[in-house]
Image (tube, rainbow, N blue to C red):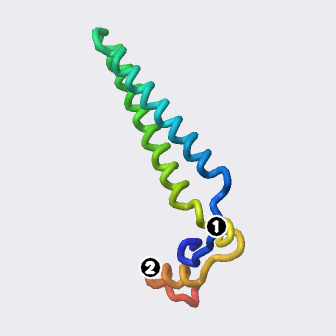
Amino acid sequence: VAIICNHQRSVSKSHSGQISKLSEKIEELKGKKRKAASKGFGRKEQKELEIEKKIDQTDAKIEKMQRDMMTKEDLKTVALGTSRINYLDPRITVAWCKRHEVPIEKV
């Protein structure tokens, strides 16, 4: 709703700092992943499975942080609270009713 209604806000002063902190954390996790991968060579199968599991968990963390960073970047000028707190836009309600074949009068 905020994007459709063009609810804008200025970019916060701390935005670039937040993005750089997320980037640093991602790089740190990538470093840990490389370190864990290098430890896996020459060990028994069970240890290799544990290391592989840790690598997969780290990959999942990296992907989540990258998605969070992209979302933060994409929504840096969108005022989400304005539409969430004040009203539900009737255009959205009408579009939903039409999509799901619900009579508007029922809503």
> Local crowd at mark 1 within 10 Å, few (<14), some, or many (≥20)?
some
Residue 26 on image: x %, y %:
48, 37
Relative horizontal placement of residue 90, taking residue 82 as reference (left or right): left
Say which label, 2 or 1, has the lower sequence index.
1
User: What residue do we see at 35% from left, 24% from top?
Assistant: 52
Image quadrant containing the N terminus: bottom right
* Rendered view: 93 above or below 84: below
* Rendered view: 43 above or below 54: above
Q: Nearer the viewer, residue 93 or 56?
A: 56
Task: Quadrant for residue 83, please give it.
Answer: bottom right
Separation of residues labelled 2 and 1 (CA atoms): 28 Å
Q: Nearer the viewer, residue 43 or 67?
A: 67
Relative horizontal placement of residue 58, taking residue 77 as reference (left or right): left
Task: Quadrant for residue 77, please give it.
Answer: bottom right
Determine which residue is flagged by label 2.
Answer: 100
User: What residue do we see at 40% from left, 27% from top?
Assistant: 33
User: What residue do we see at 51% from left, 49% from top?
Assistant: 69
Extreme residue in the right direction: 86
* Residue type, numbered disc 2: His
Image quadrant containing the C terminus: bottom right
Residue 85 on image: x %, y %:
70, 69
Query: Which numbered circle lies on residue 51?
Result: none
Residue 9 on image: x %, y %:
65, 67
Extreme residue in the bottom direction: 105
Determine which residue is flagged by label 1.
Answer: 79
Task: Quadrant for residue 6, please give it.
Answer: bottom right
> Local crowd at mark 2 within 10 Å, few (<14), some, or many (≥20)?
few
Q: Nearer the viewer, residue 41 or 57?
A: 41
